[in-house]
Image (tube, rainbow, N blue to C red):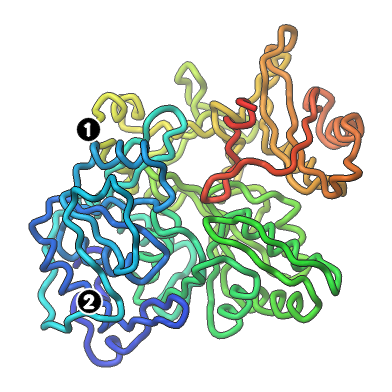
Amino acid sequence: MTLLLPALQSPTGPAASREAVRFGALSLTYGELAAASTTLAARIADAGRVAVWATPTAETVIAVVAALRAGVPAVPLNPRTGEAELAHILADSEPTAVLAGPDDALPPALEKLRRVTVDARAFERTEDHPAVEADPEAPALIVYTSGTTGPPKGAVLPRRAIAASLDALEDAWGWTGDDILVHALPLFHVHGLILGVLGPLRRGGSLRHLGKFSAEGVARELGSGGTMLFGVPTMYHRLAEVLDASAGGGEQDVQAGGGVLDAQAGGSERDALAGALSGARLLVSGSAALPVHDHERIAAATGRRVIERYGMTETLMNTGIRADGVPRPGTVGPPLAGVELRLVEEDGTVLEGPEAIGEIQVRGPNLFTGYLNRPDATAAAHTADGWFRTGDVGTVDEDGYVTIVGRKATDLIKSGGYKIGAGEIENVLLGHPGVREAAVTGEADPDLGERVVAWVVAADPDSPPRAEELADHVAGQLAPHKRPRTVHFLDALPRNDLGKIMKRSLHAG
């Protein structure tokens, strides 16, 4: 606690009355959050590990802060996790208790655990007690990966890694206690929980969580003092749609980052959103690449650039566009303070130069300790000299800015002797007026090795563009060997809770 959240150690005077978090009508000051978390920490001090039913509520914040205060590792649980996956996570992490809100209905898999109720509206205000003086290497959180290549693995995140990443972002973004962060991200993942909750609390600033993502909510909170907005590309895409919409446009209802976007695209709403985004100090997108087309639409309507950063569950934050740097749409900026980054060929050769494309490997104080109960997977994820193999493929320009090509397994296409990044083709497709959404994959081809395949959601489903038209559009802007050989039209692209396109589902389809 002393290491991670100094503002909550013993808040007194003006600090105690400063708003720490707000969820809808419910607001907690630093004094109230300290009191609630101290009381809860005493109840779980001997728990070993605790599961947290991570709903987007103040109760989740209290639970995680209490676990940090008690020095007890917390395992955030996605309330939408399926029965089999939840059973695996519980068997692997072996929590002895689950922290949940008073109205949460827990699934049968959690019935065997001691339930500790967390109520943000009713807690005993006890005398503050010093937090546990935990070792920087002590585990703070165990966050489970998405499990795309097998059962989810629990990434053990030490207090040291969380502090290092948040302090590197303070340096990059000029993040201070005066900042008020707005977001609607889920709280079971690194983006929403560590960056979006522990980030402002470490700085002594404030968090306003929207609960459900909406353009109206973003405009309201940024327009009433919010200084920073965190979101995933799906959210920024929907904001761009509202900014683009003509007066009197219809209503959209889209799943985005675990919430629902309901945006009336009328002129007043559009103007309010544009003004609010223009007034924000920082607009940050993460968890997946933000298409260049959406970058440009938001910049044209607001005069402000969205900046991107790059991180993973196992590494927390690796790179980021600086607040005082040059925004470059399509890039995720240079490595953050303390982070080393290199590109590596499949045979282990370290690559250099702006034309090089290879797997991104990183090392630094931001790295996780390892995968829980998986020494084999931990060893396989690291090189002998301590570099973490991200599995992402990218390039680094002469100024050190990193561009993510995509995942090595799904986004690097080897066709006719060329290495092709799916991301650049997706960006070109999204620039076509007939395309609303696009994803690109590679599929086995007896002649080329792999052929480029595009999956497209048409802007007008009743009149989609011709496949040949899209292929020629890509070839004309990039190169002939990057043209899609096959184009599939879909009603929607499959996405996970963070808005990432699930490309393995496209292959399976």
Tell me if 188 is positioned left or right of 37 in this view.
Answer: right
For the point 48% across and 26% down, the residue is 350
Residue 397 placement (x, y as % from top left): 61, 41
Of residue 37 and residue 478, the one placed in the foreground of this image is 37
Residue 422 placement (x, y as % from top left): 67, 33
In the image, is residue 419 above or below residue 386? above
Residue 382 placement (x, y as % from top left): 34, 29
Tell me if 241 is positioned left or right of 178 in this view.
Answer: right
State which mark lies toward you, 1 or 2.
Answer: 2
Q: Pointer 1 and pointer 2: residues touching (CB < 8 Å)?
A: no
Residue on which disc 2 sits: 36
Of residue 429 and residue 345, the one placed in the foreground of this image is 429
Q: Quadrant of residue 124?
A: bottom left
Residue type marked 1? Asn
Tell me if 385 is positioned left or right of 489 in this view.
Answer: left
How packed mark 2 is, by other alpha carbons closer than 10 Å (few <14, some 14-19, many 20 or more), is many
For the point 19% across and 67% down, the residue is 2
Residue 170 visible within the image: no
Residue 251 placement (x, y as % from top left): 75, 66
Q: Secondary structure at mark 1?
A: loop
Of residue 301 and residue 324, the one placed in the foreground of this image is 301
* CA distance separating discs 1 and 2: 32 Å
For the point 33% across and 36% down, the residue is 153
Residue on which disc 1 sits: 373
